[in-house]
């Protein structure tokens, strides 16, 4: 099997970085360097095959045009993770979109699916896609949300976004898996937590509790990045920048 690339296109929260009109440290840094970080979404590419993990931006469609689209694995139906599906459903051939059960869905996706065929996940039951294995893991968030354990011939990764915590059944399951790497939500700094996401200290502790060999933080907020920069904080695990590639 060819190299399996996990590409993070956007790694911020719904506001992105820089935030329009904001002059915090993070937004000024991004704006001055000409960088932009959009909502969290990623894709797995190997050979001519491509699998999307969330679609918070319809830019994914242009980025990977011409690849063989295998499946979409959706963590939840919040707009910053599902927006791109509004266009993806009009593709020329059918493909499945695996997702947690959520009767509200997003917009009219569940009633007008077109070529994107929605398939409800069964928690902890694996799905095979082009030789890879995806296992949905329930997470604590404001909407029904699933992270995924992604098993390839080379590595086993956990993609855990969005979440404010992990219930015992899910954490017990994750701790029994030999995880090479964990990518986990860490939107907040240590002075703020409204209950929808983890702060970076909470995320650090969860990575350690899973015994993963590597850990990365995702779904960054501009305030949390400013907090880290302003306080010169050295993190146990780094945040992933936009357009980051990891081989799994």
Image: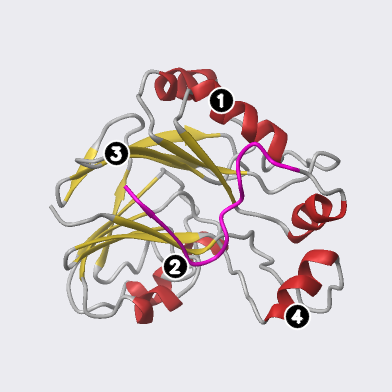
Give residue 155's mark.
3
Q: Residues within 10 Å of mark 2 (few under 14, many from 20)?
A: few
Taking the image as shown, residue 86 lies to the left or right of residue 140, namely left
Give residue 32's mark.
4
Q: Report the front residue among 168 and 228.
A: 228
Q: What type of secondary structure mainly makes up the magenta span?
A: loop
Q: Which residues are magenta?
A: 234-248
What residue sits 44% from the left and 78% below the top? 59
**Dot 4: element:** helix
Q: Considering only order in the chain, which callout, 2 or 4, is on the residue closer to the N terminus? A: 4
Residue identified by numbered label 1: 208
Query: Label 2 to label 1, Cα distance in Å?
Result: 40 Å
Q: Considering only order in the chain, which callout, 1 or 2, is on the residue closer to the N terminus? A: 2
Query: Label 2 to label 3, Cα distance in Å?
Result: 36 Å
Query: Label 3 to label 1, Cα distance in Å?
Result: 18 Å
Residue identified by numbered label 2: 108
Q: Nearer the viewer, mark 2 or mark 3?
A: 3
Q: Quadrant of residue 20?
A: bottom right
**Dot 2: element:** loop
What residue sits 84% from the left and 65% below the top? 25
Q: Residues within 10 Å of mark 4 (few under 14, many from 20)?
A: few
């Amino acid at each position: 099997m060819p190299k399996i690339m996990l590409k993070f296109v956007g790694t911020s929260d719904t506001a992105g970085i820089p935030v329009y009109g904001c002059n915090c440290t993070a937004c000024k840094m991004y704006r001055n360097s000409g960088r932009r970080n959009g909502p969290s979404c990623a894709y797995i590419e190997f050979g001519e095959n491509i699998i999307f993990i969330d679609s918070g931006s319809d830019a994914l469609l242009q980025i990977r045009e011409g690849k063989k689209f295998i499946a979409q694995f959706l963590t939840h139906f919040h707009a910053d993770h599902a927006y791109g599906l509004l266009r993806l459903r009009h593709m020329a051939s059918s493909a499945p979109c695996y997702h947690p059960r959520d009767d509200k869905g997003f917009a009219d996706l569940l009633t007008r699916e077109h070529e994107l065929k929605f398939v409800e996940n069964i928690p902890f039951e694996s799905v095979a896609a082009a030789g890879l294995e995806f296992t949905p893991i329930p997470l604590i968030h404001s909407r029904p949300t699933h992270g995924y354990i992604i098993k390839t011939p080379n590595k086993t990764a956990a993609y855990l976004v969005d979440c404010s915590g992990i219930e015992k059944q899910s954490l017990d399951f994750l701790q029994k898996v030999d995880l090479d790497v964990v990518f986990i939500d860490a939107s907040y700094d240590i002075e703020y937590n409204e209950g929808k996401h983890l702060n970076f200290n909470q995320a650090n502790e969860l990575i350690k509790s899973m015994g993963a060999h590597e850990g990365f933080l995702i779904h960054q907020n501009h305030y949390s990045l400013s907090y880290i920069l302003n306080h010169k904080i050295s993190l146990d695990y780094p945040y992933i920048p936009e357009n980051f590639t990891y081989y799994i």
